[in-house]
Amino acid sequence: HTARLTLDPAFTIGEVNPRLFGSFVEHLGRCVYTGVFEPGHPSADEAGLRTDVLDLVRELGVTAIRYPGGNFVSGYKWEDSVGPAEDRPRRLDLAWRSTETNRFGLSEYIAFLRKIGPQAEPMMAVNLGTRGVAETLELQEYANHPSGTTLAEQRIAHGDKDPFDIRLWCLGNEMDGPWQTGHKTAEEYGRLAAETARAMRQIDPTVELVACGSSSQSMPTFADWEAKVLAETYDLVDYISLHAYYEPQDGDVDSFLASAVDMESFIENVVATCDHIGAKLKSKKKINLSFDEWNVWYISGWHAIENSGARDWAEAPRLLEDNYSVMDAVVFGSLLIALLRHADRVTVACLAQLVNVIAPILTEPGGPAWRQTTFFPFAQASKHGRGTVLDVRVDSPTYVTAKYGEADLLHATAVRADDGTVTVFAVNRSRTEALPLHIGLTGLGLTSVVEHSVLADADPDARNTLADPERVAPHPAEGTVLADGALTATLEPLSWNMIRLA
Ligand code: AHR
């Protein structure tokens, strides 16, 4: 039967914060080296940045870019990564069992952001695994203080006259995870995060701070962790983080296709936990959510390497280079829809990661850069998903999943831009059936279908590869009609859809 929803400008969720379209560059595998940075590459600029990658990053439409990790940050010494490149130390990276040359560092990261353009914003993680308050303050002073102190003058002597003006800071990474170097209990981390936040605000009370939440909703400490950390930090931080990765487990594709059910419940449970602590503290302040790692990730590949005990400490090895299928892109699009549907509280989100490492962009050393299937939903959502999210209640046929019980076949959201145009993002989770869609439109003054773009393929396993980098791309849909205050369309099986109305 037909899936239905009604759009009405009177019913809204909230404004989309541009930071919802953030991403993540970690010193991991080839994300940095031979990803964004490759001196000697035919497309490299004078700073060694790959301009072919820069072009794709701009087209992708990313905003905040989190850096330098991830698990990497828990061994990070920021001062190794500044100053003359030839003097920088080579270090073991315990998180990814690699050798870090520090050839790309803080200054290169800021240069990379500036090259992308004004939409790109730094989001700097600090090491609260093996370091603490003092080193964080030194980094903040080096990065942000204009001049006149030893650290600020050091930055200037290193060639960066202008301060980096980093507004958004992550207080550590995944500190709840036993795999994290310097892993802590919620009480230990909560105290350290609070003291780090308090000290950072002594330098600049306006910095925006993200406390670490759980590494996933399935962590045994989930919710208790958030409650304990927020009990220590509520007045001192602005955001709590969420991380989630999805893959088909034991071949259970139907549950995989409904991954956003987990993502939405994760968001709602974290909001409830934040508001519970706020209520206990009788606080008017709301903590927002920074979903600063999300994606499809075939994580079992990494666990196999980890469990093999391999430690060859290679430089920029090929790690986590998932090549995404059309089906992966549909799930990915559904995760984007989940974020938009909670835009009132999720005001920062970072697609993990940006290049090569579980990324929408792949590169070959010395060779080309190309778009993965997941590139397209992100680019479309970032370009057209700006404005006010409308409150979309879906009446959809369902299917049965092992993990989440009955799940809707249709997953959708809609965003109204300031000029009154509306963009609907919708996923059909059915692997076999096209889904008829009916959208009632009241009071929106919409008269035409500007575009209905679909990502779907007769072969849901199709991918873009080095040999065939343009195998998959969105195509226009047929038969989408707006008449008598209603839109009717048919969503292809296993498809991501963007329908623009004016
Ligand atoms: O994004 C890859 C890794 O996933 C990050 O380093 C870590 O924070 C998470 O576990």
Image (cartoon, grey):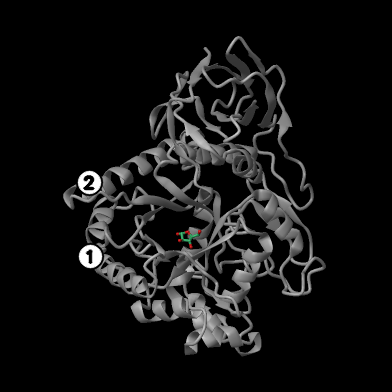
- Is 30 left, or right, of 209 in this rendering? right
Kindly identify the residue that appears in the image at 44 percent across and 25 percent down: 10
- Is 371 left, or right, of 386 in this rendering? right
- Is 473 left, or right, of 18 in this rendering? right
Question: Could you tell me residue 8's position as x and y percent?
Answer: 48, 22
Kindly identify the residue that appears in the image at 62 percent across and 30 percent down: 497
Residue 484 seen in the figure? yes
Q: In this view, does 496 lie above or below 113?
A: above
Query: Closer to us: mark 2 or mark 1?
Result: 2
Q: What residue type is labelled 1?
A: Glu
- Is 356 left, or right, of 7 in this rendering? right
Residue 312 seen in the figure? no
Question: Could you tell me residue 229's position as x and y percent?
Answer: 26, 60
Quadrant in the rendering for residue 456: top right
Question: Could you tell me residue 212's position as x and y percent?
Answer: 36, 60
Question: Could you tell me residue 4's position as x and y percent?
Answer: 50, 17
Kindly identify the residue that appears in the image at 43 percent across and 81 percent down: 138
Most foreground residue, 47 or 429: 47
> Is label 2 in contact with label 1 (beta carbons under 8 Å)?
no
Query: Disc number at residue 111?
Result: none
Most foreground residue, 434 or 390: 390
Q: In this view, does 151 lie above or below 397?
A: below
Most foreground residue, 34 or 301: 34
Q: Earlier in the sequence, mark 2 or mark 1?
A: 1
**Label total for image:** 2
- Which residue in the protein does label 2 denote? 276
Please tell me whether mark 1 sits on a helix, a strand or a loop: helix
Q: How crowded is mark 1: few (under 14 residues within 10 Å), some or many (20 or more)?
A: some
Which quadrant would the C terminus be assigned to in this image? top right
Query: Disc number at residue 187?
Result: 1
